[in-house]
Image (spheres, grey):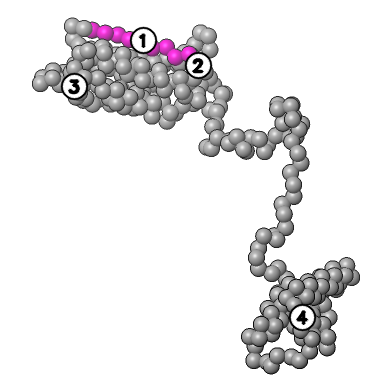
Amino acid sequence: MKVTAFYLANKVEEAARSYFSNSFVFSSRTIDVERSVDFRLGRASLQFFVHVDEQDRIPMGGMVFASVQEKDNKAAFQCRYHILPSGESKEFFLMMGADSEQYVHYSNLAQILRKHWEKKIDAYLPKGEEVPVMSDQPQSVEDEYDSLSPEEIEAITGVRPEPKAAAPAAVASKEPTSVHEQASEDEIQRLMGMMMGGGAQEPPSGPTFSMDEIEALTREAQQKDAGRGRKSDADDKPATEESDIMSAEDIWKQISGG
């Protein structure tokens, strides 16, 4: 297909109509296009109009193309856009392959018109009508679901969602969450060190216990410790009183019978 001014005008119109069909403002409006062609002079023009009601329409301007020269399988065109009602106008030259179609050229020419139209887009709307505002970020499916009430979700899906569970307390942390817990952990570590003979102290004389018995006594000490902590909470007493913390020596006395 040989690229001529007439062919160029047709392709620019096609690209412009693609823009109109996807435009948030123009997609719901009727756009008229008037074309004129002079094959003898190698000229073609496009003029766009937007309807504001069934009878009235607003001129949007358009673009004129004129063939200048064709040489070495390349075609040169003189182009001119004229925007209404602002009256902005400019001439420029375009060179492209005479026998090869390059849609990017047509898209770029339509882009020029689009940018000027969108500068003052309210000029193409009926008086008093405001330009609709699009949200910058479309709402995701999750956000849309979260915005629905349980009744609305049930009406749409036929299934009533379960009430959302309260967020669990911060128990996943491996670090002790109170001075009381920290003290208990430290005392148990000291006790284990004493039982394994890692400390500088001499092994205490007294009855010996199996590992199962030691673990049972340790758990019992921790349960008593936790029980005192809950009771003190109920009495509005600080959970870190010395009476609520069993020392390593106390646990060792229970183990050794002392």
254 with respect to 1 (left or right): right
Magenta highlight on residue 140: no
10 with respect to 76 (left or right): right
x then y, percent, for residue 118: 43, 28
* Marks 3 and 4 close (CB-CB < 8 Å): no
In three-dimensional space, the C-alpha distance between marks 3 and 4, rounded to whole angstroms, equals: 97 Å
What residue is at 52 percent from the left and 18 percent from the top?
28
Q: Earlier in the sequence, mark 3 or mark 4?
A: 3
Residue count near mark 1 (Cα–Cα under 10 Å), binned few <14, some 14–19, many ≥20: few
- The three-letter amino acid code for the residue at tag 4 is Phe
Q: Which residue is mark 2?
A: 29
- The three-letter amino acid code for the residue at tag 3 is Gly
- The three-letter amino acid code for the residue at tag 1 is Glu
86 with respect to 187 (left or right): left
- Magenta segment: 29-38
* Marks 1 and 3 close (CB-CB < 8 Å): no
Q: Which residue is mark 3?
A: 97
Q: Earlier in the sequence, mark 1 or mark 3?
A: 1
159 with respect to 48 (left or right): right
Q: Earlier in the sequence, mark 1 or mark 4?
A: 1
Front-most of 253 and 10? 253
Q: Which residue is mark 1?
A: 34
State which mark lies toward you, 1 or 4: 4
Local SS, label 2: loop
What residue is at 84 percent from the left and 73 percent from the top?
224
Quadrant location of the C terminus? bottom right
x then y, percent, for residue 52: 51, 15
State which mark lies toward you, 2 or 3: 3
Q: Which residue is mark 4?
A: 209
